[in-house]
Every structure is written in C-alpha cells, then in structure tokens.
Amino acid sequence: MEGAMTEPGKEMTHLDARGRLRMVDVSGKERTAREARAEATVEVSPETLTRISEGTIAKGNVYEAARIAGIMAAKRTWELIPLCHPLQVTGVEIEFSADPARNEIRILSRVKTLDRTGVEMEALVAAAHAGLTIYDMCKAVDRGIVIRDIRLLYKSGGKSGTFERA
C-alpha cells in the first residue's frame, strides 16, 4: 500500500492508498534499542527565575514538579498524540539549566526504549509538558512566560538510523 509522497522515495506512512489516516502496523519490525533527545526553552522574567532558583514559588519546587510532569507525559504520549503507538518506555530523564543572562530555562529530555518504533514524540512531549508545568507553577507571578523552540535534538535506532541536529 503506497501513501502520498513527501520527498522522493519517502512515503507518508500514516496514509492508506485512499489518503485516509491509519495507524502503521509495526508488528513485523524487530525490537531495537532506540533513544531520542529533545529540548524546549522557557522565557521568564528575571524575578521569576530568581524565585525558581531560591525555591520561593508558592506552588513548590518548580523543577521537580516539571521533571515529574515530563516523565509522566513521555509515558502517556500514545494517549495524547493520535496514531502514536503505546511503547515500553525504559527510561526518561529531564534536565534543566537556567541562564540568568537570558532569563531562560532550557529543558532537555532523553527517552529510551527497546521497541519497534522510535521515541521522538515521547521526548518532544516530555520537554513540552515540562515547559507547560513551569508555566503553571509560575503563572501567578509571571503571565508573560513564553515556551518556545520545542525541537528534536537527536534520535537513534531503527531503520532510518541516527539524526543529530547540527
């Protein structure tokens, strides 16, 4: 069954011959080790960044709440994104780095599996959801928060091989 073409030699695998959406059948694929890393950036006011660093946000520890939210989101990506397969996620890491000179928090997610399809969406959802949680934790003191630059940094495993953002 062939779908619509995006680039020469690449099919839109989620479309059937009539252009209808479908979930790709991965049952014939081998389970392989796969990993993906993604990032998101959260812009906050200088005061908010200071309060996060000092642990004085009223809702609690912003980074730990965002870390748990990102981990939970990675595990539930298949429920949030149509046509994603439920995967056996074997590891999720969420790291934060604050840049006071730019009033930014960089979120890095890393997701691993031993499965038939990749974890790119899980890594992206983890980074995005961690950013949304930072917003939720801090919105009472900073309504101007911006979440931006959610993007895949790296993926390995599977037939398509390795991708690394330059």
Image (tube, rainbow, N blue to C red):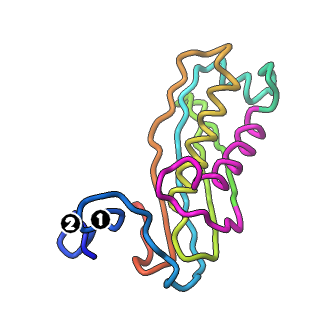
Q: Which mark is residue 5?
A: 2
Residue at 47% from the left image edge and 57% from the top image edge: 83
Residue at 47% from the left image edge and 44% from the top image edge: 150
Residue placed under numbered mark 1 in the picture: 12
Which quarter of the picture shows residue 122?
Answer: bottom right
Q: Amino acid at mark 1?
A: Met
Asked if disc 1 and disc 2 are in contact, CB closer than 8 Å, the reply is: yes
- Looking at the figure, which quarter contains the C terminus? bottom left
Mark 1 burial class by Cα count in 10 Å: few <14, some 14-19, many 20+: some
In-front residue for pair 164/98: 164
> Does the magenta-highlighted stretch encompass residue 147?
no
Report the magenta stretch's main SS: helix
Residue at 56% from the left image edge and 28% from the top image edge: 103
Question: Label 1's element?
Answer: loop
- Looking at the figure, which quarter contains the N terminus? bottom left
Place of residue 120 in the rendered image (x, y in percent of width and height, measured from the top left): 51, 61
The part of the chain drawn in magenta is 62-91
Q: Which mark is residue 165?
A: none
Place of residue 94 in the rendered image (x, y in percent of width and height, measured from the top left): 68, 51
Question: Label 2's element?
Answer: strand
**Side (left or right) of 10 relative to 27:** left
Place of residue 17 in the rendered image (x, y in percent of width and height, measured from the top left): 24, 68
**Side (left or right) of 97 relative to 27:** right
> Does the magenta-highlighted stretch encompass residue 72?
yes
Residue at 55% from the left image edge and 60% from the top image edge: 37
Q: Amino acid at mark 2?
A: Met
In-front residue for pair 56/72: 72
Up/down of 112 relative to 67, above or below: below
Q: Residue furthest left?
A: 8
